[in-house]
Image (cartoon, grey):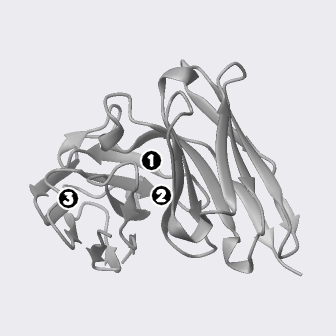
């Protein structure tokens, strides 16, 4: 099974900050990596797919990079609505997914 | 506009059964594979099962194999999850989700609001 490890598990940031979240796969998954945002009490929302492709309707301050085993989600300028938990998800073994454990972004 | 609405959750005793439904609208339901993903209270997301667009292929996470069964009725645009022999550790919010418009490998681009299942004596 492919394991996904996110870091950090949580971080504190201020509005306007640049935020970076890392996701590492236990084996190469090419670019089969997707990122989701989940606000408290809400369903996950797809932000990026294929490691770097922005899902329709998602603000351009979100970006992704990486390939193989190491991936990054970057929020260029954190906005109030971005305080949430972020999950990476591998789809290399699709349709059998694995999610990272999540990274909570809260207010500093 | 795509909408996925889950129902059927509730409280059930260990060993009991429950059937979840996910009614879809705003899309050609029969064209897309569908997922169930769950989230235990305060925990992360866990993939549970996937069913192909025509219902012919199904996949399950190991912990639910032999206990859960996914199905769909394309004439009713509805996805189901039959959960038998429920365990305390099945307690979670269950989400249905639609495979990405472009490819299955690109995750799920629409999710339902989730339905809570509590397994407790």
**Could you tell whether B117 is left or right of B49 in the image?**
right
Q: Earlier in the sequence, mark 3 or mark 2?
A: 2
Residue highlighted by disc 1: A45
Q: Residue at x 17, y 46 (%)?
A: A52
Judge if badges 2 and 1 mark residues of a common chain.
yes
Disc 1: host chain: A
Q: Secondary structure at mark 3?
A: strand
Identify the image quadrant of residue A1. Answer: bottom left
Tell me if residue B114 comes above or below residue B63 in the rendering. above
Q: Secondary structure at mark 2?
A: strand
Disc 2: host chain: A
Residue B52, x across and y down, in percent: 49, 35
Q: Give the mark toward the camera: 3 or 1.
A: 1
Q: Residue at x 33, y 46 (%)?
A: A47
Front-most of B40 and A92?
A92
Q: Residue at x 66, y 25 (%)?
A: B77
One can see residue A85 in this view? yes
Disc sitting over residue A74 in the figure: 3
Disc 3: host chain: A
Residue highlighted by disc 2: A38
Neighbour class for label 2 at 10 Å: few (<14), some, many (≥20)? some
Tell me if residue A14 comes above or below residue A11 in the rendering. above
Marks 2 and 1 close (CB-CB < 8 Å): yes
**Could you tell whether B18 is left or right of A86 in the image?**
right
Q: Earlier in the sequence, mark 2 or mark 1?
A: 2
Residue B80, x across and y down, in percent: 70, 42
**Could you tell whether A71 is left or right of B109 in the image?**
left
């Amino acid at each position: 099974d492919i394991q996904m490890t996110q870091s950090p598990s949580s971080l504190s940031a201020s509005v306007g900050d640049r935020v970076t979240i890392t996701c590492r796969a236990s084996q190469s998954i090419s670019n089969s990596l997707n990122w989701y945002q989940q606000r408290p009490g809400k369903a996950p929302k797809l932000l990026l797919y294929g490691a770097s492709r922005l899902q329709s309707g998602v603000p351009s301050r979100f970006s992704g990079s990486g390939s193989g085993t190491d991936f990054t989600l970057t929020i260029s300028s954190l906005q109030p609505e971005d305080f949430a938990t972020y999950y990476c998800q591998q789809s290399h073994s699709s349709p059998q997914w694995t999610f990272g454990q999540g990274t909570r972004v809260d207010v500093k | 506009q795509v909408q996925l609405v889950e129902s059927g959750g509730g409280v059930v005793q260990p060993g009991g059964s429950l059937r979840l439904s996910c009614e879809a609208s705003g899309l050609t339901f029969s064209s897309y594979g569908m997922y169930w993903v769950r989230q235990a209270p305060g925990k992360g997301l866990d993939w549970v099962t996937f069913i192909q667009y025509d219902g012919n292929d199904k996949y399950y996470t190991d912990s639910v194999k032999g206990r859960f069964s996914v199905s769909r009725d394309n004439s009713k645009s509805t996805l189901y999850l039959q959960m038998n022999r429920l365990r305390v550790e099945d307690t979670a919010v269950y989400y249905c989700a639609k495979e990405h418009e472009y490819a299955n490998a690109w995750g799920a681009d629409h999710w339902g609001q989730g339905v809570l299942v509590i397994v407790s004596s």
